[in-house]
Image (cartoon, rainbow, N blue to C red):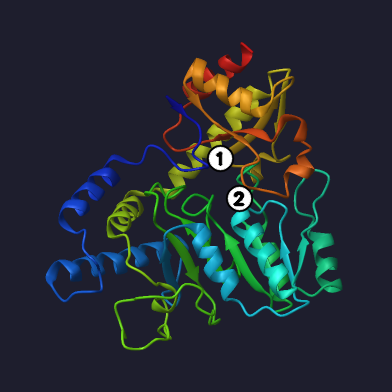
Amino acid sequence: MIYLDNAATSYPKPETVYQKMDWANRNMAVNAGRGTYRVAQEASDLIEDTRKKLIEVVHGSGVESVILTSSATISLNIILNGLLFTKGDVVYISPYEHNAVARTLHRIAKEKGIRIRELPLKENLEIDLEKTKYQFIKDRPKCVCCTHVSNVTGYILPIEKIFQMAKEYEAITVMDAAQSFGLVDIDVRICKADFIVFAGHKTLYGPLGIAGFIDCSVIDLMPFLVGGTGSDSLKLDMPQTKPGRYEAASKDVVAIAGLYEALSVLNQKENFNIEKKLTEYTVTCLKTLKNVILYTPESAENHIGVISFNVKNYKSEDIGTILDEEFDIAVRTGYHCAPYVHKYLADELYLGTVRIGLGQFNTKEDIDQLVDAISEL
């Protein structure tokens, strides 16, 4: 199989990730933090070492907290439901947001009466920073949620500039880095993000089931998930300190072991260069096909890893089925859990897009076979 669905989850993982998880499952699959015996302490040490490696990815100084969860969606729910919104508060989102943000804020808007505003786009579908500045003047932001890399088009959003403007109004800033963490550089010293959400199973090449967020803020979120933490068990309130305040339930030590190994072998610069070159090669090849409609950023500089397209006279799902059944090529089709951006792409006729998600293990030969397959349609 030619796997081109890395935007959903990276596959395969580095071989040592599989080996580490197998070892952990046999030797360290205990409940960390709930026991004083040696293996439980070793599991706890592994968790803390993983937190340290995650902070290194974002050039952290050590003052940031790392909260571990089971998914980026859970992380965003903890953050957004933990903020003290009041009726009339304005929350800005980019049109590229995933439903992990969009649906969560939609429910909060219905419950608390907050107002959700989309950041404006230029004709080339890049964020219009000048109009954004005037929007912030007109409707002061309480919070700005922004994805770093679009899971539909691969557009790298100017998140540092957006957040810098947001901080002029003391807004809370939330970065969804599920498609970028460990691939596109993030520096907590300059990006002005209060919360940076990551998914272990995507650009970090770890397993499913482990994710979280970097908390760079001085904000005390109201606990959204509550339960056992292995500490202060006689108290019915959640712990006051981070990360325990946000980490109810037992941790998946085996998945954390896999993430630790993935971080240990991660070569961010090399992976970025591989994906950047392959992204540009794929776009160049697809542009040679006359019946292909591409939905890509205007500038190659602002594009990595994800490419959406359609083929005239075919529904996107039909292309996905043909590529799978006749050519053993795996792509993603549909609306990709991103409810806002498709109105700008005007892809309703095709029921969404065909999405290519590139990864470090893909090659030019994979793309050549994809292009040959589409050429036969």
Nearer-N-terminus badge (2/1)? 2
Q: Please, what secondary structure does the residue beneath circle 1 have?
A: loop
Q: Residue at x 43, y 79 (%)?
A: 245
Tell me the amino acid under the disc marked 1. Answer: Gly
Q: Is residue 51 left or right of residue 327?
A: left
Q: Which mark is residue 319?
A: none
Quadrant including the N terminus: top left
Whether residue 189 is visible to the viewer of this picture, yes or no, is no
Q: Residues within 10 Å of mark 2 (few under 14, many from 20)?
A: many
Identify the residue under disc 1: 305
Q: Is residue 357 above or below residue 113?
A: above
Which label sits on residue 149? Answer: 2
Q: Which residue lies at the image location 58% right of the left edge and 68% below the top edge?
A: 190
141 left or right, relative to 246 = right
Marks 2 and 1 close (CB-CB < 8 Å): yes
Asked which quadrant contains residue 296, the reply is top right
The residue depicted at 51 percent of the width and 15 percent of the height is: 326
Query: Outermost residue, left direction?
Result: 38
Height in image: 202 above or below 176?
Answer: above
Residue at the extreme bottom: 235
The amino acid type, in three-letter code, at marker 2 is Val
Q: Nearer the viewer, residue 17 or 278?
A: 17
Whole-percent x and y of residue 115? 77, 69
Q: Observer-nearest residue: 132 or 346? A: 346
Q: CA–CA distance between discs 2 and 1?
A: 9 Å
